[in-house]
Every structure is written in C-alpha cells, then in structure tokens.
Image (spheres, rainbow, N blue to C red):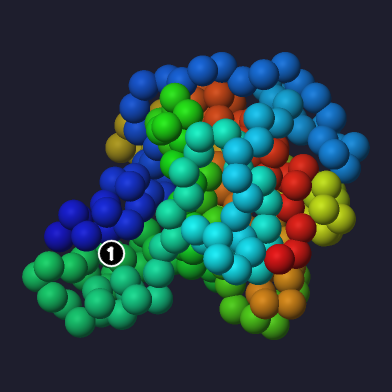
Amino acid sequence: MAVALAAVLGGCAGAADDDGKKGASASPAAKGAGGEDTGPGGGAAARGGTIGAAGSPCELPVSFSLAKDWKPKAIDAEAQLAKASKGSDDDLSGAFAESFLRQGPVIAACEIDAKPAGNIGFLRVWTGKKGDADAGGVLRAFVAAEDNVSKAKYHSFRTGGGVSAVEVEYLYTSKLLDETKKESAFAVATPDGPVVLHLGGMDTEEHEAMRPAYDLAKQTLELA
C-alpha cells in the first residue's frame, strides 16, 4: 500500500523524510535579498528555474526561484486523499494518507527534489484554504501537527519579493530512531490561501546542507 504514496512523495514524508547520504555542504552565511539573515550555514544557492506561476511544474499562489538542479513535482493531494478514502487495496487507507498528505491546516502541493543537485532531501510546499489570512497561526498549527517537536522559535520577516512571512526553526525527535534533528519552515498568507514551505532532512547536518535552497526561496518568493 505504501508504494502509491511513495511515488507521490518520493518515498519520504513527514518527520522521517529525506533519507540517505550527505550532500555538499552549505555555502557561507549571507544576507538575503530583503536584507534578512538567511540563517546558520547558508547563503542562497545558485538559481535554477522558477515555479509557482501558471504553466510551471507546480502552480501555486506564490512563485519563487529553485536552486540549480533541484527538480519540482506537483502533488495532487486532494485526488490522492479521495482515492485513499475509498479503501482500495492499491491505495493507502484514508487515515494513513492523511498523515502524509495533510499537516494541520495545509495539504501537500509540491515536492522539490534535491537528488539531482547531490543531496537526498526535499523542499516541500503546502497550501491551505482560501480565506485563512493568519500566516503565523497556520504555521503554529502546522508545527503542532508534527509530534515530538521542541524549542520552536518564531520570527517575522519579509521575503525578497515583499511578502510578509513568519518563520519557525525547531527540533524534531524521532522516537523510532531516537534522534533529534533541526527543521525549518515559513508561511505566508495569499489571496488564495496560506502557503507553507518546509525543509526537513535526515538529520541536522543534512538540513544545513540543503538550507541554501530554502534560503533562495525566502529571498525570491512573491505572489504569483
């Protein structure tokens, strides 16, 4: 049953995502286009394509630049959840699909694969329902839906594209692996609903190695 969702989320999802060998280390710290500190370990990555606008691999309420060689893939979470709810032997059960495709008030919309760039991991985009304009509240609900989270630190900033955003950095502890790792996410409100970008990683080292791609999204994100 897990094969169906593995095809959608690249075999990785939620807190146990982004499994594999370490990739290249992050570049030195730098300031973002909007003047914000991009965080530990990272200036933004070299730019590849742009996603979010109509006709791009993932059509979203926002658009932003991808790190070079990172490959995006759209996720039709609503369709996957509808199929799973029918209880077919070929699909995940509704409850199991919910745990991978929905987190708090948002559902998976796009998965950007770092593998072609030399890392094993993903930057994931989640979207919510139109009318929810509280980016901070959406982000807190997103984090609360991920069990075993600690030391969450929130702050506001403005993306390089001029969009007000709320960011969180926190620690996730895997009971299965008995390991704690760093994760990061930020949320924005749009006329079409909230958007959350999340970067996980197998461990903190992997997270930091992929951080430049996340920082590039922060520096270039604008309303689509």
Q: Is residue 95 left or right of residue 184?
A: left
Residue 65 point in image, percent of width and height: 66, 46
Q: Where 163 falls versus 29 (above or below)?
A: below
Residue 143 point in image, percent of width and height: 57, 54
Q: Quadrant of the C terminus?
A: bottom right
Q: Where 10 falls versus 129 (above or below)?
A: above
Looking at this view, name the residue that lies furthest to the left: 89
Q: Residue at x 41, y 50 (%)?
A: 14
Q: Is residue 56 left or right of residue 65?
A: left
The kind of secondary structure element at disc 1 is helix
Residue under numbered circle 1: 96
Q: Is residue 56 left or right of residue 4?
A: right
Q: Where 61 falls versus 87 (above or below)?
A: above
161 or 210, nearer to the observer: 161
Residue 30 point in image, percent of width and height: 80, 25
- Whether residue 165 is visible, yes or no, is yes
218 or 68, nearer to the observer: 68
Q: Is residue 169 left or right of residue 72?
A: right
Q: Residue at x 55, y 66 (%)?
A: 55
Q: Residue at x 58, y 72 (%)?
A: 128
Q: Amino acid at mark 1?
A: Phe
Residue 110 point in image, percent of width and height: 49, 57
Q: Quadrant of the N terminus?
A: bottom left
